[in-house]
Image: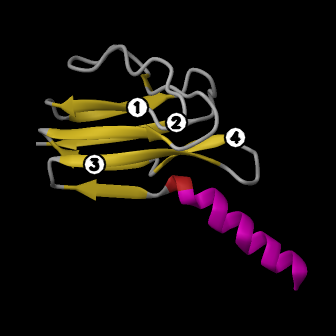
Amino acid sequence: MGIVCLLGVFVALTSAGCGTAVSDGPNLTIHIVGNPLGNPDSFYKPRRITISIGTTVTWVDRDDSIHTVTPDTNYPGWSGGSGDLSTGQKYSHLFKRAGRYTYHCMVHPDMIGVVIVNR
């Protein structure tokens, strides 16, 4: 019974960063949080979002480590990313084009995220 309970806690904690958020509004916030189990160290919560054109996404570092929000490629309309974010710092981007945008943390390569922008 103890192993089953621990497994349930592990699944709940590790899947917390894997959620999907959908927004039709003008703003959406993604939190950068630490993983209490330590592997991966941190994650974007939610990791995958679906938004409409004209939505501003804001990433907030809620972890005690430095992180970045870095597009995987120089997408038309989104290149460069955040630079280093310390605890409490924010980075925002207004998505003006439909598409699938993948991103990661330069400090923690296992941290990945996806923004899907619908027309």
Q: Nearer the viewer, mark 1 or mark 3?
A: 3
Which comes before the other along the chain, label 2 or label 1?
Answer: 1
Residue 112 circle label: 2
SS state under label 2: strand
In the rendering, which numbered label is found on residue 28?
A: 3
Residue stretch in magenta: 1-16
- According to the picture, the residue beneath numbered tag 1 turns out to be 102
Q: Nearer the viewer, mark 2 or mark 3?
A: 3
Left or right of residue 58: residue 13: right
**What residue is pinned by disc 4?**
41
Q: Nearer the viewer, residue 4 or 23?
A: 23
Say if 12 sits above or below 69 in the image. Answer: below
Image-based side of 89 in relation to 93, left or right: right
Point out the tag, 2 or 3, that comes first from the N-terminus. Answer: 3
Does the stretch in magenta take in 13? yes
Quarter assignment of residue 69: top left
Amino acid type of the residue that numbered disc 2 sits on in the rendered structure? Ile
Amino acid type of the residue that numbered disc 4 sits on in the rendered structure: Asp
Q: Secondary structure at mark 3?
A: strand
Q: CA distance from mark 2 to mark 1?
A: 7 Å
Main SS category, magenta section: helix
